[in-house]
Image: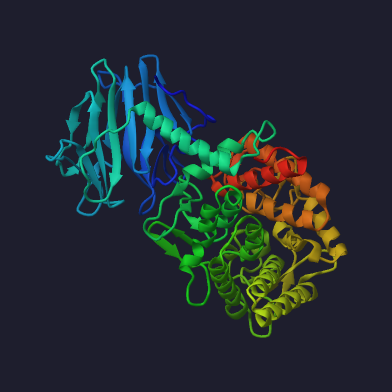
Amino acid sequence: MTVAPQGPAFSLQEIPFSHSGSWFNFSPVIAEKTYADDVHLVSHQNGLHPILRLVPIAGDRQRQHATITATPALLTWNHHRGAITLAYESVDTVRVTGTGMDLLITAANPSLTPFSGPYFFRDPVDGAHIYTVYETGRRYRITVLSGHLTDVTGGQALGTTERGVVCTGDGQTWEIAIEEYDTARAPYRAEHSFDEVHKGAQTAFSAFVDSVAPWRDEQTPAAELAAYVLWSATVRPAGFLNRPGVLMSKHWMNKIWSWDHCFNALALAGGRPDLAWDQFQTPFDHQDPTGALPDSVTHSEILHNFVKPPIHGWTLRQLRRHLHLTPADLRQAYQRLADWTRFWLTHRRAPGSPLAHYQHGNDSGWDNATCFDPEPVIETADLAAFLVLQMEELADIAAELGLHHEAATWQHGSEQMYTDLIEHLWTGRRFRARSALTGDTWTSTSLLDLMPIVLGARLDPAIGDALAEGIRAHLTPHGLATELPTSPHYTADGYWRGPIWAPSTVLIEDGLRRAGHTELADDISNRFRALCEKSGFAENFDAQSGAGLRDRAYTWTASAYLVLAAAHQRRSGHHLG
């Protein structure tokens, strides 16, 4: 008996269909902002590469315009003629079965050159059909379990041609397995029925969502889908990732940036502490000799051309409330965090200046925020505030480890950084930026200038009140616009010059709450959660309309929803599991 689909339904235009641990997914998104007419198997090894195109057809090879539906464990093409269903058996193998429709599977790239494209052949060992693809350096094997393959084209061909097969049952049910692997493996043998495979995938996802969102109820209607976005974007260790990683997306934002990972770690901490700790540690695995973290890490690429803001002390303080770290874990985390902090204090302070600087907006994570318009090499208040918190956390950990001299040094550094922040960048009404080269100063209408609210109760109450008033001016019906909505620089789809973003929302909501502005914090949380429930988990959102923008399956947005929803449920006294 077929297992009924469970969990939230979603559009493949918005969220790819995948499975925790897999490096490939099924989606019509085949490049940045590029949507194909058909669903593709898309691999994220060595980049983003569409590998196979899957097209439901009738017996005369006419495309059938099927309705595609997706739930966490089942992808379905429905048509009045019949249906095709797909489920993950494991992280590198899917099963596909159909009745009433055939399935054309062809190489997404028709061109084979000496250095690119797919080569296609039939394996004489077991009769399976195999694509070996330059772009990923992997093989993709199709094995028939029932029915048969017809219209096999392009076998052993060179140059440009269609390379594909048609899966058919001649009116009966057909079934195949598709695998992604390296060089060789034993012939595929089915050990479970399709229904058992589907049930296994459903069980795996259900266990995940029950662990990370046990508190979910009718007040948090997007929790399951948020959990799916995280679960499906997780990949197993491979390439430069030597621990399980949550990519920012299995669309084109398929990397781990060195501040995005913090929000994913926070969302996972309560229910999947080991996976949360892996997320926090991933960029630190690639820390350079100066202590700097890479800008981003993914399967086959580590970038050091920029860095990201040091929110890791703020993150670690929250993680330590949920994770039971061993002494060895804590010592390693302390050393890595200390080296990261010294990078800023040593390599990012101009001679004679007590404050660290960014070299570009990209270093801040707010790539094109308006505070960088006059000049990008600047000292900013958010950076100083993050370092205040980071040194304070280092002081606490050093004391816990019995390193009392180091604890005193970090505590003094934190207090001095706060003093210098106020002395050099506070105007009496708001914070300003200062050129690290000339000393010139200016203010902007970017929300980034208000980020020192993350200091919470450490702020002078008058400064906290002024920041809260400025933050309130950025509120739209949907949340915090990153540029003042009345600013001439405000742009609806302007990246950090207007749209609502998850990280700024979470950081500011937390800071306001710790500064005693709980009513405003509640309002921001309520608006952002409602935004996600309406518009999904986009990279960012139009602040006025609430429409999702850019990559539409972004994990830090899903994580922000889970973090804010869990906290709301705790405050409301709802069941937490």
**Left or right, 272 with reference to 353:** left
**On-image quarter of the N terminus:** top left
Q: Position of residue 358 (x, y in %)?
A: 61, 70
Viewer-closest of 277 and 103: 277
Q: Residue 425: in sight, yes or no?
A: yes
Q: Residue at x 50, y 63 (%)?
A: 283
Q: Residue 294: in sight, yes or no?
A: no
Viewer-closest of 315 and 260: 315
**Left or right, 438 with reference to 427:** left
Furthest toward the bottom, the residue is 352
Q: Which quarter of the picture shows residue 327?
A: bottom right
Q: Residue at x 41, y 51 (%)?
A: 236
Q: Position of residue 288 (x, y in %)?
A: 47, 73
Viewer-closest of 64 and 533: 533
Q: Residue at x 73, y 52 (%)?
A: 509
Q: Position of residue 122 (x, y in %)?
A: 15, 38
Furthest toward the left, the residue is 124
In the rendered image of this protein, does residue 381 appear above or below residue 252?
below
